[in-house]
Amino acid sequence: MNSTPNRALAPVHPEPLAYSVADACRVSSIGRTRLYALINEGRLEARKIGKRTLIPATSLRRLIEGEA
């Protein structure tokens, strides 16, 4: 008999590479208008992919941590 307890593995949820504008607002508690202002000021990066605007997670993290 195996002495190791049978444990269910928790699902792994990797951090996203980028956020949609709506998701970036949700996770950062920054409003949509302010988010776009930060992009226009150059303090937050944004990438257009087709019609979508994506915010790189690293850029959002730098902003929140005070490095932007």
Image (tube, helix red, strand yellow):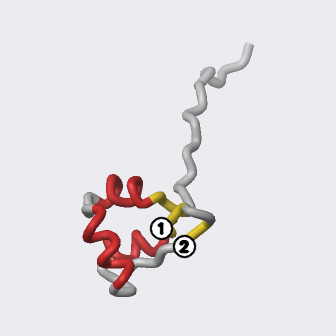
**Lateral position of residue 1 relative to residue 51, left or right:** right
> Which residue is depicted at the point 32% across and 71% down?
64
The answer to whether residue 68 is seen in the rendering is: no
**Quadrant including the C terminus:** bottom left
Q: Which residue is mark 1?
A: 55
Which mark identifies residue 10?
Answer: none
Question: Type of residue at label 1?
Answer: Ile
Location of residue 28 with respect to 34 vertically, above or below = above
Marks 2 and 1 close (CB-CB < 8 Å): yes
Instruction: State left or right for residue 43 relative to residue 18.
Output: left
Q: Secondary structure at mark 1?
A: strand
- In-front residue for pair 46/6: 46
Instruction: Name the amino acid type tagged 2.
Output: Arg
The residue that label 2 is drawn on is 47
Q: Quadrant of residue 33?
A: bottom left
State the image coordinates of residue 52 (x, y, percent, origin top left): 54, 61
- Residue beneath the point at 61% across and 66% down: 49
